[in-house]
Image (cartoon, helix red, strand yellow):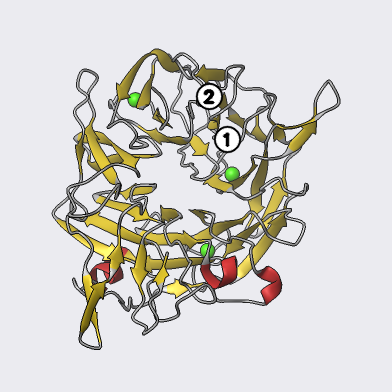
């Protein structure tokens, strides 16, 4: 297991890079203007962080920049063992202070408790099921706040029938590790698969610029999926230890719709950005199994009420269009643009066989609610891209199982006034011997933040199976 951090060493003149990342299953993008022409990530001297064997350390990554004087890296290890009593592989998030020489990471104590009991009809039952909950599969930071989720967390509903519902749960570390609160918006009375019982809240997550939390829960309502959002302040106010069901003021969520939308997985991926022309940031939700033929969709949801403002559909059956979404101002015109990944997109190879190459779609925002799909699309050139893409304006696109030995590849594409360049400016390869297990280099990516304070953004590449 390892996690590589690359420093930018030789940026072009006037380069202040914008960079964004998009990954399928987690996705990444942020950016800052202006677009630059040339830069290189220093891949010779990456800082490498490692975690416990088998913990999937690197499954999720993010920067943590709580103040201007320190920088660090957050690393999710969803199969890590914790000190929680009687919990097996509860999962953890590691905090790794940035330094080239030092690799001492320690876990963040989001939740130290084992499974909590619940009393029903004067009988005590096990209320939580935290073993194998995948805590740390999703990690996002916003200033001095960290959101980390366990999408496979289950609880015993407060119903007479003994049900355990995988609602998922999330925790926030607030005020720079001084307080921790739980946020489990799918743990409601609307249980079982017809309600929010199979929500897997926190399967995807993001923060708006002003610190609102947005969660994807792709399993709600017979896997229609849903998107839920609340402000950090309201989540903190609603938190009361010991209560399984919380009522968060002003929380908004998408509702159940017609059964034809069952099994479409809305919220498999989420992102934020301003698309409607007001000052309330909107949400992008991937719906990768939308429609009977699994073409997949992406919705742009109004940030005020979550109504669907725009819907884009995939072009190929089973391509998993929307399993990764990302927002960034790729062409530096001041308006955020949208990137959508379809990792299973098939292309006919030279031998005539169809191969999963993956494709990324770039939608440039021309004016509010008016996005233009740029051509040509970025299509993978290596088979076995399987899951990923990350982009950078510079967009990084990763193919965690790409490359001849499936050791994983990360491509860097430069942005320009009319979108993204067709050819990558840099290709980074996983730097370890290929083993029998695909290395997953690039499974998670984050960029656009500056760790070593040299003025150039850095890139974190997670690799949870690397040896
Ligand atoms: Ca808006
Ligand atoms: Ca733009
Ligand atoms: Ca830097």
N-terminal label among 2 and 1: 1
Quadrant for ligand 3 reads top left
Pinpoint residue 173: horizontal percent, then vertical percent: 23, 54
Q: Is residue 414 above or below residue 108?
A: above
Q: What SS does tag 1 mark?
A: loop
> Toward which corner of the image does residue 388 lie, by quadrant?
top right
**Closer to the camera, 408 or 90?**
90
Q: Is mark 1 within 8 Å of ligand 2?
A: no
Q: Which mark is residue 408?
A: 2
Pinpoint residue 333: horizontal percent, then vertical percent: 57, 42
Could you give the CA–CA distance between mark 2 and mark 1, rounded to whole angstroms?
11 Å
Q: Is residue 347 above or below residue 155?
A: above
Is residue 414 rendered to the left or right of residue 243? right
**Closer to the camera, 298 or 383?**
383
Q: Which mark is residue 389?
A: 1
Q: Residue at x 56, y 58 (%)?
A: 285
Q: Are marks 2 and 1 in contact (CB under 8 Å)?
A: no
């Amino acid at each position: 297991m390892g996690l590589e951090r690359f420093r930018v060493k030789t940026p072009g003149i006037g380069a202040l890079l914008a960079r964004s990342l998009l990954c399928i299953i987690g996705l990444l993008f942020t950016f800052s203007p202006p677009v630059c022409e040339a830069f290189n990530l220093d891949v010779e001297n990456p800082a490498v962080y490692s975690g416990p064997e088998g913990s999937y350390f690197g499954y999720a990554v993010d920067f943590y920049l709580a103040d201007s004087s320190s920088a660090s890296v957050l690393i999710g290890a969803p199969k890590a063992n914790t000190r929680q009593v009687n919990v097996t592989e509860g999962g953890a998030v590691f905090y790794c202070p940035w330094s080239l020489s030092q690799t001492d990471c320690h876990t963040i104590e989001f939740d130290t408790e084992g499974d909590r009991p619940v009393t029903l009809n004067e009988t005590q039952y096990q209320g939580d099921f935290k073993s194998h909950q995948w805590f740390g599969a999703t990690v996002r930071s916003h200033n001095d706040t960290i959101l980390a989720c366990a999408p496979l967390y289950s609880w015993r509903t407060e119903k007479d029938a003994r049900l355990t519902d995988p609602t998922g749960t999330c925790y926030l570390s607030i005020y720079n590790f001084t307080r921790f609160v739980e946020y489990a918006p799918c743990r409601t009375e609307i249980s079982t698969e017809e309600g929010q019982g199979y929500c897997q809240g926190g399967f995807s997550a993001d923060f708006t610029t002003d610190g609102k939390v947005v969660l994807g829960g792709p399993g709600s309502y017979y896997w229609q999926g849903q998107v839920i959002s609340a402000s950090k302040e309201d989540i903190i106010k609603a938190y009361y230890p010991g209560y399984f069901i919380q009522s968060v003021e002003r929380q908004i969520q998408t509702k159940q719709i017609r059964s034809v939308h069952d099994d479409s997985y809305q919220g498999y991926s989420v992102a934020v950005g301003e698309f409607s022309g007001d000052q309330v940031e909107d949400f992008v939700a991937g719906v990768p199994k939308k429609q009977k033929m699994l073409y997949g969709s992406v919705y742009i949801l109004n940030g005020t009420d979550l109504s669907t403002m725009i819907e884009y559909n995939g072009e190929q059956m089973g391509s998993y269009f929307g399993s990764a979404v990302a927002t960034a101002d790729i062409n530096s015109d001041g308006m955020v643009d949208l990137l959508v990944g379809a990792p299973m997109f098939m292309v006919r190879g030279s031998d005539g066989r169809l191969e999963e190459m993956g494709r990324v779609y770039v939608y440039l925002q021309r004016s509010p609610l008016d996005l233009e799909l740029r051509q040509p699309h970025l299509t993978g050139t290596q088979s076995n891209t399987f899951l990923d893409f990350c982009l950078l304006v510079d967009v990084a696109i990763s193919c965690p199982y790409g490359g001849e030995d499936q050791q994983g590849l990360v491509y860097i594409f430069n942005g320009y006034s009319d979108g993204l360049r067709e050819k990558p400016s840099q290709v980074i390869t996983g730097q370890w011997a290929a083993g029998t297990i695909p290395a997953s280099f690039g499974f998670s990516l984050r960029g656009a933040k500056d760790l070593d304070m040299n003025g150039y953004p850095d890139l974190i590449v997670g690799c949870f199976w690397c040896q």
